[in-house]
Image (cartoon, helix red, strand yellow):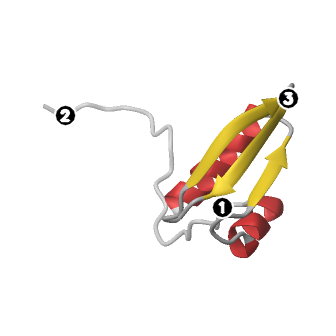
Amino acid sequence: MNLKYQKAYKIEKGITIPKKKLNPITEQLYDEMEVGDSVVVDSVRKATAINAYFVRRGRKTSQRKIGKNQYRLWRIK
């Protein structure tokens, strides 16, 4: 069976994948926080993003809501 179709996409080879742009503040927290250190952020979204960044790189955090729109994250591992 021979189907004719119009090419909608051009396949390219040898194109390198650009590095992901990371939040420099999150990177700084990752580099500088030691076990037992904590940080306060102003939204659950930021707390979750920081936690995910740490977990993907093998570290653990614990987070708690400490006030209206305030969350504290501790590095625990």
Of the numbered discs 3 and 2, the one sitting upstream in the chain is 2
Q: Nearer the viewer, mark 3 or mark 1?
A: 3
Of the numbered discs 3 and 1, the one sitting upstream in the chain is 1
Closer-to-camera residue (14/43): 43
Say the numbered circle drawn on residue 69: 3
| Disc 1 to disc 2: CB gap under 8 Å | no
Q: Secondary structure at mark 3?
A: loop
Query: In the rendered image of this protein, does residue 50 appear above or below residue 7?
Result: below
Q: Which percent across, then down, holds residue 11?
A: 46, 55
Q: Residue at x 61, y 55 (%)?
A: 53
| Separation (CA) of disc 3 from disc 2 | 61 Å
Q: Which percent across, then down, holds residue 22?
A: 73, 60
Of the numbered discs 1 and 2, the one sitting upstream in the chain is 2
The amino acid sitting under disc 3 is Asn
Label 3, residues with CA under 10 Å away: few <14, some 14-19, many ≥20: few
Label 1, residues with CA under 10 Å away: few <14, some 14-19, many ≥20: few
| Disc 3 to disc 1: CB gap under 8 Å | no
| Separation (CA) of disc 3 from disc 1 | 28 Å
Residue under pointer 1: 20
Q: Secondary structure at mark 2?
A: loop
The amino acid sitting under disc 1 is Lys
Q: Which percent across, then down, holds residue 13?
A: 46, 67
Which image quarter is the N terminus in? top left
Tell me the quarter of the picture where residue 47 sits.
top right
Q: Which percent across, then down, holds residue 21?
A: 73, 60
Query: In the rendered image of this protein, does residue 7 appear above or below residue 56?
Result: above
Say the numbered circle drawn on residue 2: 2
Q: Is residue 13 left or right of residue 75?
A: left
Q: Nearer the viewer, mark 3 or mark 2?
A: 3
Q: Residue at x 74, y 32 (%)?
A: 65
Q: Residue at x 71, y 74 (%)?
A: 31
